[in-house]
Image (cartoon, grey):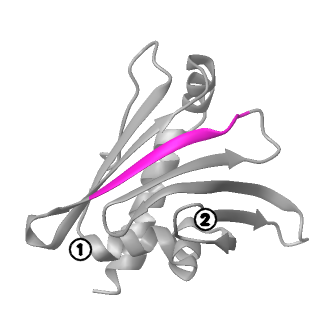
Amino acid sequence: MERKTKVDAVEGKQEIIITREFELPLNLLFKAYIEPDLVEQWMGNKVLKMESKPHGSYQFETQDAQGNILFRANGVIHEFVPDAKITRTFEMENTPFPVQLEFLEFVELAGGRSKLTMHVIYKSVEDRDMMLQMPFAEGINMAHNQLEKVIGKLI
């Protein structure tokens, strides 16, 4: 099955470009990234904090049935332009991965569709390559498939 989310990683660079076209209107795609209840539905993480504004911050976590934290991530929002851009940091806590910088751009396409482009910059080429050794591309594609399924119900 073809991945709809494309991950482009040029050898020797410390960045990844992620693109996906969605069968969703722009405003709903953007809401999927900023409204806590929607984020929880498609990401499968509990949203502990979500301040969708310049200089705001966010924090997500996932726990197992016993309450042990399996995953926690946080970041700071640097630029926030409704229905257009989010520039933020992203840090996975208690992992060897350093903070990364993410530029998210949302574009309206014809026919009630939209496109997301994520430009992710890592501290080093080695950090970027370590991320790519994980099932990163499959994971983000699965998450975006879930986003489209969950948010598509709002149309």
Q: Quick check: 102 above or below 58?
A: above
Which residue extends farthest left? 110
Residue 76 position, x and y percent, is 62, 55
Q: Quick check: 132 above or below 63?
A: above
Residue under pointer 1: 25
In reply to whether residue 101 is colored magenta, the answer given is yes
User: Which amino acid type is marked by label 1?
Assistant: Pro
Instruction: Identify the main secondary structure in magenta.
Output: strand
Residue under pointer 2: 56
In reply to whether residue 93 is colored magenta, the answer given is no
Quadrant showing the C terminus: bottom left
Image-based side of 82 in relation to 121, left or right: left
What's drawn in magenta, residue-wise?
97-106
Residue 105 position, x and y percent, is 33, 53
User: Which amino acid type is marked by label 2?
Assistant: Gly
Image-based side of 89 in relation to 106, left or right: right
Q: Residues within 10 Å of mark 1 (few under 14, many from 20)?
A: many
